[in-house]
Image: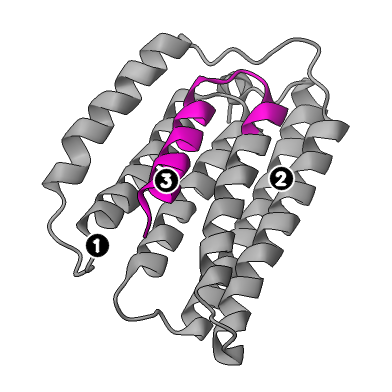
Amino acid sequence: MSSPIIIGCLALGLGVVVVRRRSVALMLVTAQSLLLASVALSRTGGHVDSLPAAGGLLLRLVAIATILGIGIARTRETQPVRAGIEPMARVVIALAALLAIPSLVPPLGFGDRNAQHAAVALVVLGIVIALTRRATIVQILGIVVAENGATLAALSASKAVPDVIELGVIFDLLLIAVVASAFHSRIFGHFGSGDTAQLRELRD
């Protein structure tokens, strides 16, 4: 896999760590998913057998962008949801995790070592996003970033992952996005905000 694609995916993931607006975070993750879908499409080589997985990635891209875009439009925040951790601190945490964790992961059997590190790095970034942000929509996007790491791993594997497995993963992620979006709407409807810190007010 080309270095510009890898660098672009990592840069967009780091952007989600920093940005405040949910809509901007959604655009960054959508662009990241579009990069991976374009790689999948370019590798079909006109083979019909390879189209379902590539088409599934495009469908996932459109579906998640639509679901979360509607969620953002329907749940306008009266004020930005503060993460509780300043942007520069989040960047430091993310960079520290990126420097430490990928190097500890044993070889995954890819031919492309750089793609392996990038795939693990995206999973790490997704976890960092989900743990350091309090806005439910951004936490969902963290899950998508982590799954994009798994997609990058599949695209970089020397042997293609069976289409049925790829489509199954795509379906699972779409299901998670739908359920999480509904969960976000319920939180917003009850508290008037998508801030997960509000859940601390709940008592048995």
- Residue in the image at 58% along x and 61% along y: 38
Callouts 3 and 2 close, C-beta under 8 Å: no
Which label's residue is closer to the chain start, 2 or 1?
Answer: 1
Marking on residue 4: 3
Is the residue 159 above or below the residue 97 in the image? below
Q: Position of residue 88 (x, y in %)?
A: 41, 10
Q: Which residues are magenta?
A: 1-25
Quadrant in which the C terminus appears: top right
Q: In this rendered view, identify the residue nearer to me: 69 or 204.
A: 69
Of circles 1 and 3, the one toward us is: 3
Side of 143 where 57 appears, left or right:
right
Amino acid type indicated by mark 2: Ser
Residue 85 in sight: no
Distance between the alpha carbons at the discs numbered 1 and 3: 14 Å
Quarter of the figure with residue 79:
top right
Quarter of the figure with residue 31:
top right
Residue bearing the label numbered 1: 112
Q: Could you say whether the residue bearing mark 2 is in a helix, strand or loop?
A: helix
Residue 96 in sight: yes
Q: In this rendered view, identify the residue nearer to me: 1 or 20.
A: 1
10 Å crowding of disc 2: few (<14), some (14-19), many (20+): many
Amino acid type indicated by mark 3: Pro
Residue bearing the label numbered 2: 181
Q: Could you say whether the residue bearing mark 3 is in a helix, strand or loop?
A: helix
Which label's residue is closer to the chain start, 1 or 3?
Answer: 3
